[in-house]
Amino acid sequence: MKFGVVTFPGSNCDEDIVYVLETILEQKVERLWHKDTDLKGVDFVILPGGFSYGDYLRSGAIAKLSPIMGEVIKHANSGGYVMGICNGFQILTEAGLLEGALLHNDNQKFICKNIHLKSASLNSGITKDLNTRKAYKIPIAHGEGRYYASDAVIDKLEENDQILFKYCNADGEVNKGANPNGSVLNIAGICNEGRNVFGMMPHPERAADAELGNEDGTAMFLSILNHCN
């Protein structure tokens, strides 16, 4: 599989993603610039974390207008795989590829720490190989990570099994105390109806290297390799 990692002005997790895919998982990776208008034959596009365009207006609001996003939207609408992590998730909601929005954390502060999440679905490529009983320790680093959507959208996400991840405690319990930012239903990640566009706020690429003492995020990338080709 050939991955494309997009860099916007202000991206700061692009090289982390490239390192995990290229060095640890030995995959082909194409670096894509926000001004590109060609996806260069990639199979799977990743929009990384960071602060695209300084998070002016709203996080992801300007990045969605970048030339590359026209191609990313075409790729997604034709069934191609797209994943947005943190700021990438925000860009996907701004671009209309995922429903809902990421609002300011309920404590109005930037949060950077390890949290736990669990798979809420086994029906998407990124979650098919995950253990639904396991609490995966994955870092977060965001100021606008509170997932919000209307009741109608939330009902649809639940009905269609589009909720990928929920924040939980170390024992795998999904409760208010385990919710770091006030997200509706503890939602940490969702997918589209076609199950080819994924968005999540936590950073699995920051938990995929033995040198960091945490490889929980590797399971998500391995699931992608097994089921998104």
Image (cartoon, rainbow, N blue to C red):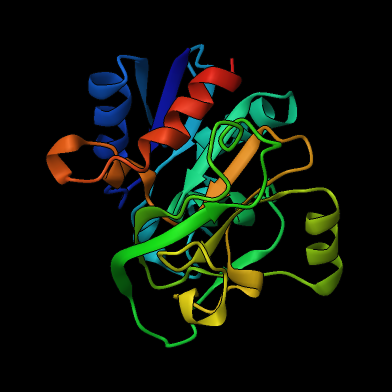
Q: Residue at x 45, y 64 (%)?
A: 171
Up the image or down, 170 lies above or below 89; here it is: below
Q: In screen coordinates, is 198 left or right of 108? A: right
- Residue farthest to the bottom? 107
Whether residue 92 is visible? yes
Q: How many marks?
A: 0
Up the image or down, 157 lies above or below 33; here it is: below
What x and y, as percent, mark residue 24?
A: 25, 23
Q: In screen coordinates, is 142 left or right of 215? A: right
Which of the pair 191/118 is nearer the observer?
118
Up the image or down, 69 lies above or below 32; here it is: below
Which of the pair 49/210 is nearer the observer?
210
Q: Residue at x 61, y 30 (%)?
A: 125
Q: Residue at x 63, y 55 (%)?
A: 93
Q: In screen coordinates, is 78 left or right of 218? A: right
- Residue farthest to the left? 211
Image quadrant of residue 173?
A: bottom right
What x and y, as percent, mark residue 51?
A: 35, 58
What x and y, as percent, mark residue 18?
A: 29, 29
Q: Residue at x 55, y 50 (%)?
A: 133
Quadrant of the frame with the C terminus: top right
What x and y, as percent, mark residue 111?
A: 33, 74
